Image: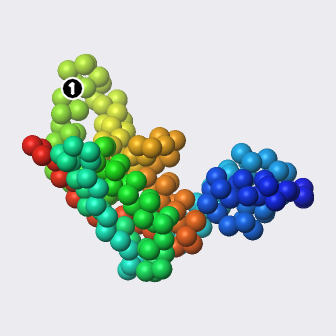
Amino acid sequence: MTKVSLESIQKLRNMTGLGMLDCKKALEEANGDIEKSIELLRKRGTALADKRADKETTQGIVVSYIHPGDQTGVLLELNCETDFVSSTEAVKSCARDIAMHIAAMKPVYVSPDQVDAAFLAKEKDIAIELLKSQGKPAAMIEKIIEGKMSKIASEVSLLKQPFVKDESKTIEELLKELSAKTGENIKVKQFARFEIGA
C-alpha cells in the first residue's frame, strides 16, 4: 500500500467530512488518488447505509424552511437512531438542505411506494390516450406505460429527485452519505410544503 501524507488525508477529510482513519485507508487503497478515494468512500458509505437500513429511527429533528419572499414554507421531520446524532451539525445542515429542496422542487410524496394509486391511474389513462392518438401499437403501449409510470412516481417522490444543490446525486443518495458519516440509519419521516395561492 502507498504511504500517504497527512496533508492529503486532511484534504480528503475536509472534502468528505469523514474520519482521519477512514480517509487514510481509502487513500492508501487508491494509491494516493483523491478522486478514487472519494469513490471508494462513497461505495463504503452506501454499503454501510444499506446495512443499517433496518435499524429503528426513533429520534430526530423537525426543521422549518421559509423561502425568501415568505410565499413558500416547509416543515420536515428527519429521523435517526439517537438524539446525539440528531443534534449534530451534519444532520441539521442536511435537514435544512432537504427542506430547501422541497420548497424548490415540490415533491408530493417521500418515496415512490407512497404515491397515491388513484393519481397514478389517472396519469396512466392520460398517457395511454396520448400514445393511442400517436398510433402506437398496443404491445408497445404496455411497455412504454410501465416505464412512464415508474418515471412519474419517481418525479413526485422526494427520495428519487436529483438534489437541487448537486444534481449528480438524489436525495436518497444524500441521506446514504449522511448515514455513512454518522454511522446511523437516517430517514425522512414526513414533510409538509406550504405555498401561498397553491
Q: Residue at x 20, y 39 (%)?
A: 123
| Residue that sits furthest to the left in the current view | 197
Residue 138 seen in this snapshot:
yes
Please provide percent x and percent y for residue 124: 22, 39
Local SS, label 1: helix
Q: Residue at x 36, y 64 (%)?
A: 188
Q: Residue at x 54, y 59 (%)?
A: 177
Residue 56 seen in this snapshot:
no
The relative height of residue 183 versus residue 171 in the rendered view (above or below) is: below
The relative height of residue 62 versus residue 83 in the rendered view (above or below) is: above
Q: Residue at x 34, y 33 (%)?
A: 144
Report crowding for label 1: few under 14, some 14 to 19, many 20 or more residues within 10 A (C-alpha): few
Pick the front one: 69 or 172? 69
Pick the front one: 79 or 197? 197
Q: Which residue is mark 1?
A: 130
Image quadrant assignment for residue 62: bottom left
